[in-house]
Image (cartoon, coloured by chain):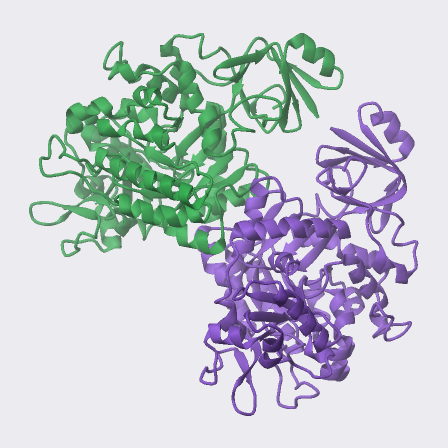
Chain colours: A green, B purple
């Protein structure tokens, strides 16, 4: 079938208007050009749709999100509240209508925003006396449990801190319900486990929410159950997002034994990079830094992998056709990763391998000397602009002047680094328009810290910000010849916007919403025929 | 692009002529019908090709072959000779032009056809004094090495037989160079290992050979290196066979941890079933039988898995979306597998899983009471008709009257069993026309054992034999809606035959060859534009 969308402003990419009409055959772009030309060539045989002057843009890709966790989060208590009291109120409301004994899950709190700081188990017990409660922090590096949850997990004053984790305790040595890093596993391992089919059902709902924001593709960083769920959807032809699925490091030996390589898969679901973690995160002060946190003179965070580890895992991976995506937040962690990847580049060259598209996830704080090295070694910077505006106060408070080269998108770009943009959902909302706004303004949605934003020299153009959600993620997925642009032969994944993001004021960007979204030549949201 | 093949006899399937023309758009069938209708509808916009009265048929699938081994075998000494002397002569010819120390590989000998029986290391040493030699038997269940190869493998009179294997020894206890089953590993583990890229290069050559026989799809039963090689080809868009890739049992835990499911993959490369081995083979007398081999009153073969093992592995597999393909040759092995799979069917029902398309590979000898059970439990019989004509004398000699329900294709079909056909290449030639001939005539190529063939009641119609290479393998791969037939929306994988296989005498079938082969709408062999 041929479909002709006319009376539109069709962007081939953020940098180029292609014409006023686009013809689509089956799932691909047949032609872009002037309304006159395309109507005369295809008008008779095509299904013609008047776009009424709207703007057509390539579909957006969120290059870093946790699809299963985001999907399940849509079913959880939203703990992203201004006060601890409001959070407790929301838990209470759910507890009142949940059968006794059934787990209550929630997500999104940040003790840094609450004047009391962390909550504790006693506070939760008061609002949920009959249900175990487990609430993850927005950073996903800490959690808050009530007494019933602690008891079910077997956590008491005799439980030692697990390696790489910490059980917060009060002055009597009793656990307070707050668990850091690997200590979260003590509860998580006893939580009821959703089946792949349940996850698949949740992803179907999430997919709908993402389409409404203009997202037609994601790079997922969840685990193997999410991969199973995605295959269930793909095989029933209900997966209508282009998913690049990363492989957790723990599965690297499995992938190698099986012979699975990055790039394998269907048009909707492909194998991505092996995901490694080099450190923790800013919120819980576990990101690995060269110098201590400003408010903790003896804490430099937790380095999980040094450059030798990266080289060791990395050689194994690239030798078997698997690329790398390495989480690094602190300047020390980024330093280790960059130097590890530089050695991997040398190894690839020495072995005669074609260079894979390795990426660093987050790249939040860089040592000034390391900034030019990403471009030099062709390392993709997978960043989440919304983190810059969410984290700015924490960054100033805990990293001080080191924030000058943190979330330093413009600086990286000026050095020639390829930036790919994501949201880290459910850590943040996956709304890409908030991401574009953040990258362009460096201001919170409420305008803070004022007109020029936080470190205004790092602001990007709207074009460059949109490229981070379109062209560059397609490159990272080795799909730059069929995704991320609207051009002849490219997949017909597109969004229809009421106005061009280039023609509105910056403050209007976060509330931009597509009026229709097309994936593989079919309207999945809105549209004339939906 | 639209392509119109006209002036043809177009078979939609072995059972139905669809018309005299077929229109193809991009990689799929747009329409089948009369030349007049299709020329008037698409003639102006299409590239029209006059097929000069030829017969167009769906492309054939070999549902059981070892693609890597077949590809590498094309580079090896062909040891399928009438005499041991001829085999030695071929090795000598290669040895004379191979640098000293480099391995010489060969394949295809069968001691049952040589009046001396097995060769030995001394004979090989005489023709290859400076090169290690390793020649695998046609059955792949035995191998023949020279002294240099034995020495490199560390095999001498002190080496014990490994579990599941045997080192043949002379009366002085010295190894003779003949290794059975797992003892082959002692040499194979020290053979130079081809890289995935080298295997990929070999597969490209093999693909060309297969297209020339009319094969456009294969179900592969090789290991993970083959899977890697196939991904390399798929990602460079040079894989133009529809491959269903099985997973060896040893990789089942890896697949489960990764979350990999049967059916995942691209249009050219999809994950198939987990492959298990329930016994050995007829040639080396290791197929597991209820009663002893006719000539070996104390040998009932080797049973590798009983029905409880099948249930144990099978539950693990189906729980994670992986179907099963189980090698079973002897009546005892088939009995265990059938009863194991029956329990897996009950488990699937009990768990509310949709039933997967499990298959038995080879199904050579069945106990008469087990014959109806395959259909009853919807177990696919993956058989290789060429084995029937290669093995008939061995079957008569070693299984006696049990041959009555061996290679019993017609009997299985009469009970409602779905038969899928393959070649087991490189154990046999992958030429599917020999397979069709074997299924239809039950005669060797030289006519033996006479006009009606071996157990003539098992002969199939040409239609049914062709279905085993087209319609049913597509079903086994869960692709019956897009492969195995030529119908609107199906993938345009087709072959052009000079005459219809239904219009020629049976004896002409083995020499039938396509004049052109198309995969995904493109001529890959022959054709007007090739």
Q: Looking at the rendering, which quadrant does residue B364 occupy?
A: bottom right
Dividing the picture into quadrants, the one containing residue A4 is top right
Q: Position of residue A111 (x, y in %)?
A: 20, 32
Q: Is residue B156 above or below residue A311?
A: below
Is B393 rendered above or below residue A140?
Answer: below
Q: Quadrant of the C terminus of chain B?
A: top right
Please give the name of the residue rendered at 32% of the width and 19% of the height, measured from the top-left corner.
A410
Q: How far across and down, in percent of the image, does residue A418 sit?
A: 39, 26
Q: Does residue B383 appear left or right of residue A365 in this picture?
A: right
| Quadrant of the frame with the N terminus of chain B | top right
Q: How many marks?
A: 0
- Residue A423 location, quadrant: top left
Which one is in front, B168 or B315?
B168
Q: Which one is nearer the viewer's eye here, B199 or A244?
A: B199
Image height of B498 relative to A10, above or below = below
Residue in the picture at 38% in, 19% down = A436
Q: Nearer the viewer, residue B253 or A83?
A: B253
Q: Residue at x 66, y 88 (%)?
A: B296
Q: Is residue B264 left or right of residue A349?
A: right
Can the viewer see residue B376?
yes
Q: Position of residue A452 (x, y in %)?
A: 26, 10
Where does residue B529 sit, x and y in percent of width and height?
A: 78, 35
Front position in the image: B283 or A300: B283
Indicate left or right for B134 with B207 as reference.
Answer: left
Q: For residue B407, say whether it is visible.
A: no
């Amino acid at each position: 079938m041929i479909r002709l969308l006319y009376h539109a402003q069709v962007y081939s990419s953020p940098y180029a208007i292609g014409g006023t009409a686009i013809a689509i055959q089956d799932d691909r772009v047949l032609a872009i050009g002037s309304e006159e030309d395309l109507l005369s060539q295809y008008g008779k045989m095509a299904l013609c749709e008047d776009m009424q002057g709207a703007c057509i843009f390539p579909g957006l890709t969120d290059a870093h999100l946790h699809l299963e966790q985001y999907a399940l989060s849509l079913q959880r208590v939203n703990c992203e509240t201004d006060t601890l009291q409001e959070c407790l109120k929301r838990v209470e409301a759910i507890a009142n209508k949940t059968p006794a004994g059934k787990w209550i899950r929630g997500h999104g709190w940040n003790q840094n925003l609450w004047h009391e700081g962390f909550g504790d188990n006693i506070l939760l017990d008061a609002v949920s006396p009959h249900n175990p409660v487990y609430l993850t922090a927005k950073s996903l590096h800490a959690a808050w449990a009530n007494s019933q949850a602690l008891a079910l997990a077997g956590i008491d004053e005799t439980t030692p801190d697990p390696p790489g984790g910490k059980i917060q305790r009060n002055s009597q040595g009793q656990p307070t319900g707050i668990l850091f890093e690997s200590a979260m596993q003590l509860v998580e391992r006893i939580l009821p486990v959703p089946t792949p089919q349940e996850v698949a059902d949740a992803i179907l709902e999430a997919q709908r929410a993402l389409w409404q924001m203009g997202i037609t593709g994601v790079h997922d960083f969840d685990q193997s159950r999410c991969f199973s769920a995605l295959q269930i959807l793909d095989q029933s032809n209900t997966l209508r997002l282009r998913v690049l699925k990363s492989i957790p490091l723990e599965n690297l030996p499995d992938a190698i034994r099986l012979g699975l390589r990055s790039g394998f898969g269907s048009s909707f679901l492909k194998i991505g990079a092996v995901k490694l973690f080099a450190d923790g995160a800013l919120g819980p002060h576990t990101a690995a830094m060269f110098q201590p946190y400003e408010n903790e003179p003896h804490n430099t965070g937790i380095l999980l992998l040094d450059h030798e580890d990266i080289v060791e895992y990395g050689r194994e991976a690239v030798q078997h056709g698997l690329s790398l995506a390495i989480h690094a937040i602190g300047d020390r962690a980024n330093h280790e990763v960059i130097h590890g990847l530089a050695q991997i580049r040398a190894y690839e060259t020495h072995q005669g391998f074609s260079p894979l598209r390795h990426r660093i996830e987050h790249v939040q704080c860089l040592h000034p000397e390391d900034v030019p090295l990403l471009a030099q070694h062709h390392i993709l910077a997978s960043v989440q602009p919304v983190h810059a505006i969410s984290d700015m106060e924490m960054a100033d408070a805990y990293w001080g002047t080191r924030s000058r080269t943190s979330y330093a998108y413009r600086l990286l770009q000026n050095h020639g680094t390829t930036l790919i943009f994501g949201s880290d959902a459910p850590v943040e909302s996956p709304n890409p328009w908030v991401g574009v706004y953040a990258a362009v303004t460096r201001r919170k949605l409420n305008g803070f810290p004022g007109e020029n934003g936080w470190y205004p020299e790092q602001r990007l153009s709207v074009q460059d910000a949109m490229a981070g959600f379109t062209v560059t993620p397609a490159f990272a997925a080795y799909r730059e010849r069929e995704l991320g642009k609207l051009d002849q032969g490219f997949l017909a994944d597109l969004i229809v916007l009421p106005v061009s993001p280039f023609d509105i004021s910056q403050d209007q960007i976060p509330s931009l919403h597509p009026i229709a979204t097309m994936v593989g030549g079919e309207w999945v949201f809105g549209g004339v025929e939906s």
